[in-house]
Amino acid sequence: MRRPILAGNWKMNLGRPAEAADFVRAIRHPLNQIETVDRVLCPPYTALPAVAEALTATAIGVGAQNMHWQDKGAQTGEISPVMLSELCQYVIIGHSERRATASGLESNEAANQKVRAALAHGLTPILCVGENLDQKEGGETDAFVQSQIRQGLAGLTAEQARGCVIAYEPIWAIGTGRAATPADANRLIAMSIRGPISEMFGEPAAQEIRVQYGGSVTPDNIAEFMLMPEIDGALVGGASLKPDFVDLVRRAADTLP
Ligand code: PGA
């Protein structure tokens, strides 16, 4: 049985240390009590120390939203795995907002270097993959996601692959209120995420790696996703910024046998 993982991606919100700490103090007690799933909060860099501090006596994990792959050097404005490893346990890699917007233009090669650097520094990468609307309408989803997986996880050992988390996030579903259907997400994950992972690293790794769904997940639809056999939790954007993120996580946990 894979242990589900529910992660809140705050994006560029709640980044002032005091507001982030206030929010965390308001949710940490009930969130910490939901012990049957892994819970992770991913604030902006500026709030990482405050959030890590507010979560010290809990089992709730902390994640960053991006990082550079080098340990240090002449990279203005970047944050390295060395800097993160004292503050968090997870790092989101290759979010579509970084892959495809002016602030990112992040390639599969860069995502792969980041995944490898995260693992080398003891951080769990949450590698994001997913197609855009044109690709979906053009019938290219499977080929596109398979290639993101193959390139993003290239060069890893089976042991390292097992320790990664994948977030399947169709871009057209992010922040739109238009989530994928659970059945479609489930099929895609089996065919185009676990499929190539099985070919690359063997079937045990494909069965052990945790795959989240992301894109307009809410307290109202989380249960349907959790009930899908291939889906092991969610990466949640907008709905992680409100106290009812706790309800979302509780509803996810309530679906477990
Ligand atoms: P959303 O974002 O839940 O607001 O759709 C998800 C994400 O981008 O990780």
Image (cartoon, grey):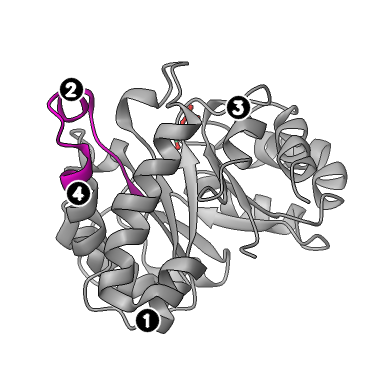
Q: CA distance from mark 3 to mark 2?
A: 27 Å
Is residue 37 visible in the rendered image? The answer is yes
Residue 137, numbered label? 2
State the mark number for residue 158. Answer: 1
Q: Secondary structure at mark 4?
A: loop
- In front here: 3 or 216? 3
User: Disc 4 marks which residue?
Assistant: 106
> Which residue is drawn at the image coordinates 47% and 16% (left, top)?
177
Task: Name the spot of residue 229 as percent of width and height, x first.
Answer: 56, 49
Alpha-carbon span between mark 1 and mark 3? 33 Å
Q: Which residues are magenta?
A: 128-144
User: Looking at the picture, how far across and down is residue 187, in whole percent?
Assistant: 39, 42
Q: Secondary structure at mark 2?
A: helix
Judge depth for marks 1 and 3 and give the one in front.
1
Above or below residue 63? Residue 251 is above
Residue 95, position as x, y percentages in the image: 34, 44
- Disc 4 residue crowd, few under 14, some 14–19, many 20+, Cα 10 Å: some
Provide the residue designation for mark 3. Answer: 239
Instruction: Judge by depth and name the residue closer to the eye, 230 or 126.
Output: 230
